[in-house]
Image: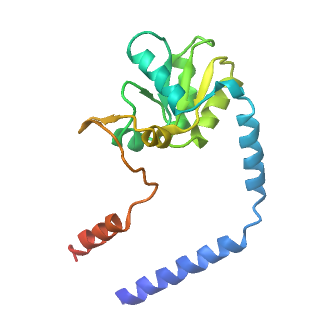
């Protein structure tokens, strides 16, 4: 009975995936892309910075030589796992809380995420509601890691990521499979 249930579930999953693949003409995708472009167009080109430019700002803020807000908009889990030392955290979906904390529309604000997708939305929204000095750090933590800059978390302190992976390695997946199968 257990095998029948697992096989039935697998067949249902495959059929669902196939149905989604054939329904590829989703009109909402085009509208989402247009909205993304509209929001991105609100960000001035000279307010998009790379890892080296952002690192310089970060050093000045930590040294007390510059007054700027450095805001990571990744999820709580991503931020807890590792983040850039001395930075603030507001999940992208909670960007609307920023005006409650930063009331000066001329405040210098830097926004980033893992790459740039969520950060682009947040930066564009902040421009749309009236902020004038918001910067998009468009390489995110991936660019920070590739540049060899340090991260921190509450458990390990400061560390560097030598190779950033978007997905677990085969060895990592293999371990998880062996670990969970040991409980059967």
Point 68% across, 22% down: residue? 129
Point 42% across, 50% down: residue? 164
In this rendering, position of residue 159 left or right of residue 38: left
State whether residue 6 is above or below residue 127: below
Quarter of image, res 25:
bottom right
In this rendering, position of residue 95 left or right of residue 132: left
Point 71% across, 42% down: residue? 36
State whether residue 103 is above or below residue 2: above
Q: Position of residue 146 (x, y in %)?
A: 45, 43
Q: Position of residue 24 (x, y in %)?
A: 73, 67
Q: Nearer the viewer, residue 165 or 105?
A: 165
In this rendering, position of residue 122 left or right of residue 10: right
Rendered-image quadrant of the N terminus: bottom left
Rendered-image quadrant of the C terminus: bottom left
Q: Position of residue 123 (x, y in %)?
A: 62, 30
Q: State how many labels appear.
A: 0
State whether residue 68 is above or below residue 84: above
Point 55% across, 21% down: residue? 109
């Amino acid at each position: 009975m257990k095998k029948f249930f697992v096989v039935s579930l697998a067949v249902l999953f495959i059929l669902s995936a196939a149905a989604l693949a054939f329904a590829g003409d989703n009109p909402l995708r085009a509208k989402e892309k247009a909205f993304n472009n509209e929001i991105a167009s609100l960000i001035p080109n000279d307010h998009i910075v790379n890892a080296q430019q952002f690192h310089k700002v970060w050093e000045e803020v930590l040294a007390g030589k510059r007054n700027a807000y450095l805001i990571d908009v990744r999820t709580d889990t991503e931020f807890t796992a590792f983040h850039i030392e001395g930075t603030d955290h507001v999940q992208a979906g909670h960007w609307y809380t920023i005006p409650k904390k930063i009331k000066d529309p001329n405040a210098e604000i830097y926004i980033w995420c893992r790459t740039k997708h969520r950060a682009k939305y947040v930066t564009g929204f902040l421009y749309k509601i009236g902020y004038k000095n918001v910067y998009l750090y468009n390489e995110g933590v991936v660019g920070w890691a590739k540049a060899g800059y340090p991260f921190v978390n509450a458990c390990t302190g400061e560390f560097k990521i030598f190779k950033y992976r978007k997905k677990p390695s085969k060895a990592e997946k293999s371990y998880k499979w062996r670990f969970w199968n040991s409980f059967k």
